Amino acid sequence: MKNIKRITLSITLFFMCSTAMVHAQTTDDETKVLNKMKVALN
């Protein structure tokens, strides 16, 4: 189950990064969320 959760987090993080790149803008809120995701992956 840990692997499934880790993969899900990775996909979510990748999707969020892609979305941010498409919009070409990074707000403070998005940065905070991405940092939380990185912490969750670690």
Image (tube, rainbow, N blue to C red):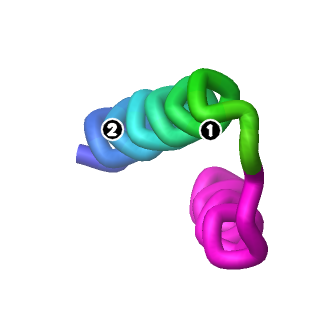
The mark found on residue 20 in the picture is 1
Asked if residue 29 lies left or right of residue 9, the reply is: right
For residue 16: magenta?
no
Asked if residue 1 lies left or right of residue 42, the reply is: left
Disc 2 crowd, CA 10 A, few/some/many (<14, 14-19, 20+): few
Of 20 and 12, which appears nearest the observer? 20
Looking at numbered disc 1 in the image, what kind of residue is underneath it? Ala
Residue 10, given in percent of the width and then of the height, sits at 50, 34
| Residue at x-position 68% and y-position 27% | 21
Which quadrant of the figure has residue 14? top right
The residue to which callout 2 is attached is: 8
Q: Main secondary structure of the magenta part?
A: helix
| SS category of the residue bearing label 2 | helix
Q: Which residues are magenta?
A: 26-42
| Residue at x-position 74% and y-position 45% | 25
Asked if residue 24 lies left or right of residue 37, the reply is: right
The mark found on residue 34 in the picture is none
Tag nearer the camera, 2 or 1: 1
| Residue at x-position 23% and y-position 45% | 1
Give the answer, above or below, for where 35 lies relative to 23: below
Residue 13, given in percent of the width and then of the height, sits at 53, 41
Disc 1 crowd, CA 10 A, few/some/many (<14, 14-19, 20+): some
Residue 6, given in percent of the width and then of the height, sits at 44, 42
Q: Quadrant of the C terminus?
A: bottom right
For residue 38: magenta?
yes
